[in-house]
Image (cartoon, rainbow, N blue to C red):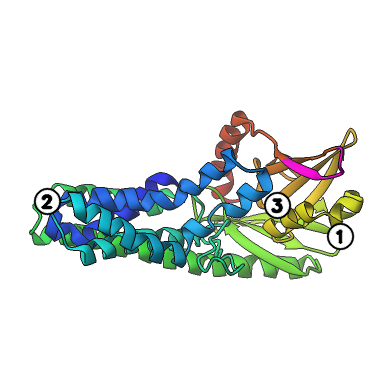
Amino acid sequence: MDSLTQIILGAAVGEAVLGRKIGNKAMLYGAIAGTIPDLDVLASFFTDTVTSLEIHRGFTHSVLFTLLFSPILAFIVSKYERYKNVKNWFWLFFWAFITHPILDAQTTWGTQLFWPLDIRLAFKNVFVIDPLYTVPFLVFLILTMFQKRMTKKRRLYNNLGLIISSFYLLITLILKGISYQNFTKELNYQNIKYRYIETKPTPLNTILWTANIETKDAFLIGHSSFFDKNPIQFSSYPKNHHLLGDLANHTKTKRMIAISKGWYTINKVSDTLYFNDLRFGTLSIQHNAKNFVFKYKILVDKNGTPYFKEELKDKQEGKKMLSELWLRVKGN
């Protein structure tokens, strides 16, 4: 999830653990702890694209990281803070750390909660920015901040923020199930034979959903709003995996394919190959849009080693997509 949401969650968790003991400082430390796992993005400055993608939401988003660093930070903070209970500091950092990857596991990218095991949890029931999750949570957190440390209202407001935000996540899982049924019903109605299907919400909402569908030679992408009255229209993207040639056998290419979980296409433009990660769709919901959110140019050095360079995104396309989403959410 976005940084603001993780700060809010961390602050609320910190308040729940130590708010009555140290007041708003609990929110501050919880907010800081809630952002620490995302420092893994710094890896992009020191490693190649493939390695950076593998590291993202890996070790720092794991149970192991939580168990290793919670006692360390608890010990350090207890040395300079007036509140000296190391055990309670441990629980603040523990819950602020562990709730971060649990929330991230609801998104498309997911988290390696059980790192070093190669298991990435990705429930795909919320987008990385979801105002319906974040805004009410923020409101209750602000209300909490302005209550005295020992008042019942302070605990009530904070608990409401945690409960309502968690309940919303449960609702999105139900909505995901409904959208899955809508897509599979439509695929059967259109007599489309498919191997696998994954559904996820479109940006900023949980009303308009998108599905990635694997067929024998192509991937399909479709959108379905709960307000739709007409059949779903599916865009088709040929896999073109054969275009990789011998590069498909290279370790780095295999790692990239593993990162995409097999949801990728290859296209060729002027003798240059591009790797498109379909899990995140395109920067448009128009039929057969080609502007993939994550598109990588495949370059090969003199030793025959491929490396992947992410193509820059056009900010104007992102703004245009917001307009398209607003219209599409209302139904087709």
Residue 129 visible from this viewpoint: no
Residue pictured at 90% horizontal, 36% vertical: 271
Element carrying mark 1 = loop
Residue bearing mark 1:
217
Q: Position of residue 230 (x, y in %)?
A: 66, 56
Crowding at mark 1 (Cα within 10 Å: few <14, some 14-19, many 20+): few
Q: Residue furthest top?
A: 316
| First-in-chain label (3 vs 2) | 2
The numbered disc on residue 147 is 2
In this rendered view, identify the residue nearer to me: 256 or 1. 256
Q: Is residue 33 magenta?
A: no
Q: Which residue does the image show at 73% across and 45% down from the upper left?
A: 287
What is the C-alpha distance between the residues marked 3 and 2? 46 Å
Query: Relative to residue 48, is residue 184 depicted above or below?
Result: below
The amino acid on which the numbered mark 2 sits, given as a three-letter code, is: Gln
User: How many callouts does the rendering have?
Assistant: 3
Question: Which residue carries the number 3 mark?
Answer: 278
Give the CA separation, mark 1 to mark 2.
60 Å
Q: Earlier in the sequence, mark 1 or mark 3?
A: 1
Q: Which residues are magenta?
A: 302-308
Q: CB under 8 Å between callouts 3 and 2?
A: no
Along the viewing direction, whichever of 212 and 52 lies nearer the viewer: 52
**Few, some or many C-alpha atoms within 10 Å of disc 3 (few <14, some 14-19, many ≥20)?**
many
Q: Describe residue 46's horizontal placement relative to residue 286 as left or right.
A: left
Would you say 199 lies left or right of 100 here? right
User: In the rendered structure, which amino acid carries the disc numbered 3?
Assistant: Leu
**Residue name at image x 24 percent, y 53 percent:** 77
Name the amino acid, label 1.
Asp
Question: Residue 127 appears at what percent x and percent y?
Answer: 51, 53
Where in the figure is residue 147, as x and y percent of width and height?
Answer: 11, 51
Q: Earlier in the sequence, mark 1 or mark 2?
A: 2
